[in-house]
Image (cartoon, rainbow, N blue to C red):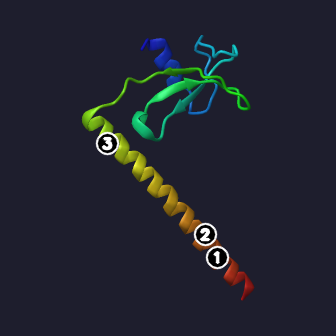
Amino acid sequence: MDLELERLLGEHREGMVVRTGLRCHHGLYPILCCNWSGSTVGRRFLSCSQVEQPCEFKYWIDQEFSGRARRVIEDLVSLRQSMIELFVNSSEQWDAMYAQRQGA
């Protein structure tokens, strides 16, 4: 990947429009995405930024991961999902306890 593209992507977060010079089939600047599941887990790509009717534009930034790197990424994604579930469950429990105390 060219250094200018890597610098530009380093300044953007997932879901932000990136003015890379590339454009989707609608002629729009793409958004930066990261795949969180499947065989391409952990790979970044640029995708159409149109929400209602996105086109099929997809520009892969990262090469496919293999071996240990892929296993580590899959483990991190799994850990991330576990942490999200723990947060949701804890929030629900906290809200229930708070509501119970307010009623007492």
Distance CA(mark 3)–CA(mark 1): 36 Å
Q: Which amino acid type is shown beneath numbered disc 1?
A: Ala
Looking at the image, residue 9 lies above or below residue 39: above
Q: Position of residue 33 (x, y in %)?
A: 55, 31
Can residue 76 be seen in this snapshot?
Answer: yes
The circle on residue 92 is 2
Residue 15: x, y in percent? 61, 33
Secondary-structure class at tag 1: helix
Residue drawn 49% across and 12% down? 4
Q: Report the residue at 55% width, 23% height from top.
A: 46
Q: Classify the position of the N terminus by image quarter.
A: top left
The residue at the far left in this view is: 67
Label 3 sits on a secondary structure element that is helix
Calculate the distance from the C-alpha at mark 3 to the C-alpha at mark 2: 30 Å
| 2 versus 84 height, above or below | above
Residue at (43% x, 39% y) in the render: 38
